[in-house]
Image: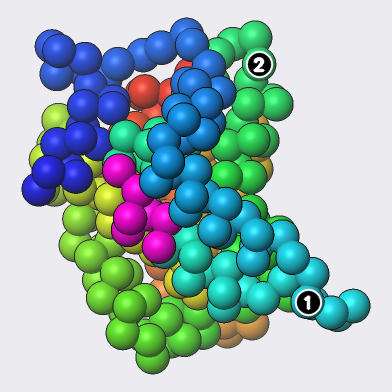
Amino acid sequence: CSHCTELTDLFLSSSGEPAITRENTCLNAAKACNLNDTCKKYRSAYVTPCTTRVSNANLCNKRKCHKALRQFFDKVPPKHSYGLLFCSCPPGDQAGCMERRRQTIVPICSYDDKEKPNCLSLQVSCKTNYICRSRLADFFANCQPESRSMSGCIKENYADCLLAYSGLIGTVMTPNYLKSSSISVSPSCDCSGTGNNKEECEKFLNFFRDNACLSKYCMTLDCCT
């Protein structure tokens, strides 16, 4: 697909190897977004509902925030949208840059929960919604790891995996970086209260956190050591 080609070009050098950079591509991506009318428009369109308090009890309208985030990734050219989400940080600005990258999807509204649901319950909730169900299926299909593969992915194309990953943003299964100092990602859930199904839950969670295909792009980020 054309999006896959554009996304691959973001991360690979002309030789086909992961393109390591010492630039603050997160800062460059933010500037580029502001200079692109479509990116600027749809970024503002999700930042507003994701940061507007609706009552004393609710920080925001999460449903509107999620819908606007889906529109951003659906409408904005990949070189801008994925440039913000999968940018790299220079050695001199690791902590601040990584935290700004983690804040890209306004996690206080789109991601964080007062009480994390267990991941199996979240998966059931996801499967009741057509968009979430189909995008989670895409994620499992395109991010299937394969240790003997050059790309780490069974389909030999980790750009497909990153596209599937970003497709989950704006659903109840929205993933994000776990912390600013890590490239590990996860939905906002855990495996507490899963009883006899804890092993199944941890397997699901590790598909995000410990996935050779999904983490392949670590090679393009200066945070991976």
Disc 1 marks which residue? 54
Image mark count: 2
- Residue closer to the observer: 1 or 16: 1
Residue sticking out furthest to the front: 37
Q: Position of residue 133 (x, y in %)?
A: 32, 79
Spatial separation of the CA atoms under disc 1 and disc 2: 34 Å
Q: Is residue 146 above or below residue 119?
A: above
- Residue closer to the observer: 73 or 146: 73
Q: Position of residue 26 (x, y in %)?
A: 52, 26
Q: State the residue at coordinates (57%, 74%).
A: 64
Question: Which quadrant would residue 129 be assigned to in this image?
Answer: bottom left
Residue 116 lies left or right of residue 122; in this view the side is right
Q: Which residues are magenta?
A: 71-77
Q: Position of residue 114 (x, y in %)?
A: 77, 72
Q: Is residue 38 above or below residue 74?
A: above
* Secondary element type, mark 1: loop
User: Looking at the picture, which amino acid does disc 2 mark?
Assistant: Asp
User: Looking at the picture, which amino acid does disc 1 mark?
Assistant: Val
Disc 2 marks which residue? 93
87 inside magenta stretch = no
